[in-house]
Amino acid sequence: MKSNFGLFLILALFLSGCTSSNMTKVTKDIRDSFTGSDLDSTGFYVAVPMEFVSLKKGEIVGEDIFKYEKKKTLRIEENTPGHVVASGPDWLSVDFGNGIVLNFRRDLVDNVYKTEGWGTVTIQEERFDIKLGVLAGTYVDLLMPRVRQ
């Protein structure tokens, strides 16, 4: 009996890269169609959840061999709306609440607005490490609700 595991894995990877049917990636053409008031009133979203872990020393909790360091952690879910707070021809700064403001720049190859899914970011004067789990080291696409025509 032949295994279909390889086919299943390829299909799973393909589907995980697809955006929800009611969301679309923000491209240069979409961005250029916006006016100032459109940008202010549109909700923007990240394509994958993002977690931010404080670089400050955390609180030690637990007892004996079960002690561990608990650090301040912030999270943006895929359904967390963000709103543009600043913009330029090839970039958007989006505020997702809790002091999390991410800068999305237009990728010149695929024309999609993205932010780095690695490194550190300053949130309310505190440095945080960006965590994406298995997606570490990749860019995160900026999404918006698909416009029905």
Image (spheres, rainbow, N blue to C red):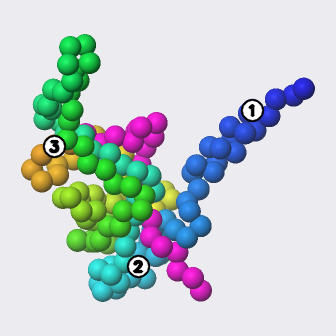
Picture coordinates of residue 73 (x, y %)? 24, 43
Q: What residue does disc 2 label?
A: 32
Q: What residue does disc 1 label?
A: 5
Picture coordinates of residue 94 (x, y %)? 28, 65
Residue 58 vs residue 65: left or right? Answer: left
Toward the top, the furthest residue is 65
Q: Separation of disc 3 and disc 2 at Cα?
A: 33 Å
Circle 3: element type: strand
Toward the right, the furthest residue is 1
Indicate the amino acid at tag 3: Arg
Residue 85 vs residue 13: left or right? Answer: left
Residue 106 shows up from this direction = no
Mark 2 vs 1, N-terminal side:
1
Give the magenta range.
129-149
Toward the left, the furthest residue is 125
Q: What residue does disc 3 label?
A: 127
Indicate the amino acid at tag 1: Phe
Circle 2: element type: helix
Indicate the amino acid at tag 2: Asp
Q: How many other residues sit within 10 Å of disc 2, few (<14), some (14-19) or many (≥20)? A: few
Relative vertical location of residue 13 with respect to residue 48 in this rendering, above or below:
above
Q: Nearer the viewer, mark 3 or mark 2?
A: 3
Q: Nearer the viewer, mark 2 or mark 1?
A: 1
Mark 3 vs 2, N-terminal side:
2
Residue 99 vs residue 33: left or right? Answer: left
